[in-house]
Amino acid sequence: MLLSTAPGHADRTLIEWRFDKPADLLGWAPNAMLSDVALRDGALHLQATNRDPQLLSPRFAIPASPWPYVEVDLRGHRSVYCIAAP
């Protein structure tokens, strides 16, 4: 998972989390309705146990310009509706 500069600007990674060390969640914390937390194949794997799973990120700070964004590679086995909270 990584934070990058905005499209159209010089692309550079500002923060990156690589889940390549066993048992090191790098500050990410399953908060509610998640189980089977595991790190494998360089990814964080979780199982949602209800309709409102919550995963908390570690605290981080990035400049608010020029329009940074968060890039998340998320895969699921079912169709889901997702809202990212600020």
Image: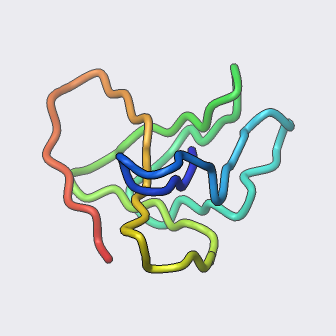
Q: Is residue 11 left or right of residue 71?
A: right
Residue for point 44% across, 79% down: 64
The residue positioned farthest toward the right in the image shown: 21
Of 39 and 73, which appears nearest the observer? 73
Near-viewer residue (68 or 84) = 68
**Residue drawn at 60 percent across, 79 percent down:** 61
Q: Quadrant of the C terminus?
A: bottom left
Q: What residue is at 60 percent from the left and 38 percent from the top?
A: 44
Task: Specify how the rendered protein is coloured.
Answer: rainbow
Q: Residue at x 36, y 43 (%)?
A: 48
Work out which quarter of the rendered image holds the N terminus and state it.
top right
Q: Is residue 23 left or right of residue 41?
A: right
Q: Nearer the viewer, residue 57 or 54?
A: 57
Give x and y (percent) for residue 54: 39, 62
Q: Position of residue 46 (x, y in %)?
A: 50, 39
**Numbered-mark total:** 0
In this rendering, is residue 78 above or below 12? above
Q: Is residue 8 left or right of residue 18?
A: left
Q: Position of residue 45 (x, y in %)?
A: 55, 34
User: Is residue 31 placed above or below 33 in the rendered structure?
Assistant: below
Up the image or down, 86 lies above or below 30; here it is: below
Dividing the picture into quadrants, the one containing residue 29 is bottom right
Q: Quadrant of residue 27?
A: bottom right
| Relative image position of residue 41 (x, y in whole percent) | 69, 20
Residue nearest the observer in this picture, 77 or 13: 13
